Image (spheres, rainbow, N blue to C red):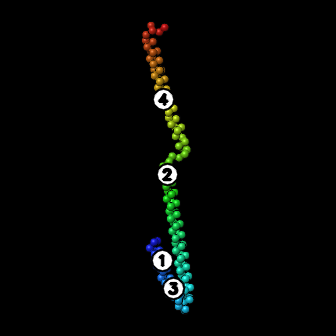
Amino acid sequence: VQPAQGRINEADEVYRQRLAMQAGTPGHAGTHAVLASALAARAQQQAAAQRLQQQQQQRTNQLRAQQADDAKVDKTIPDATAALVPEAALFRQLVEYEQEIDAVVQKQLQEIKRLQQSKTAHPRLVR
């Protein structure tokens, strides 16, 4: 857009020079009006091109910001899952504790069975 802008500015300068040269001659009043309207139209085109460029830049910035936000969201845990994480940790600890208790109870049961078998094998020890 910048090289085109430079060419437009050069063309405007040529129009202004022609306008200045012909403004002093009496027979060129119609040419003066045409050149003036051409300069006005050129200025409107430049303003429209600048507005369009600014809008495109804003859209590009918005898309980049949205992509950055999307990337952040993809990396985070959803709220519902994050709320369950502490509960899941507590549940895991509870399961581990239950396993420890089961292991102790199992050992005690085995010890009781072993003692019962040993008592039946030796009836004198039983009272």
Frontmost of labels 3 and 2 is 3
| Residue that numbered label 2 is attached to | 72
- Mark 1 or 4: in front is 1
Amino acid tagged 4? Gln
Q: Could you give the CA–CA distance between mark 3 and mark 1, rounded to whole angstroms? A: 16 Å
- For disc 4, the marked residue is 99
Residue drawn at x 47%, y 17% as measured from the top left: 112
Q: Nearer the viewer, mark 2 or mark 4?
A: 2
Q: Residue at x 53, y 81 (%)?
A: 38
Q: Earlier in the sequence, mark 3 or mark 2?
A: 3
Query: Label 2 amino acid?
Result: Lys
Inter-mark Cα distance, 3 to 4: 99 Å
Of circles 3 and 4, the one toward us is 3
Residue at horizontal 52 percent and vertical 35 percent from the top: 90
Q: In this rendering, which labeled residue sits more in front, label 2 or label 1? A: 1
Q: As shown in the figure, which amino acid type bears the numbered disc 3?
A: Ala
* Along the line of sight, the residue nearer the viewer: 123 or 56: 56
Q: Circle 4 — which element?
A: helix
**Distance between the Cα atoms at labels 2 and 4?**
39 Å
**Label number found at residue 20:** 3
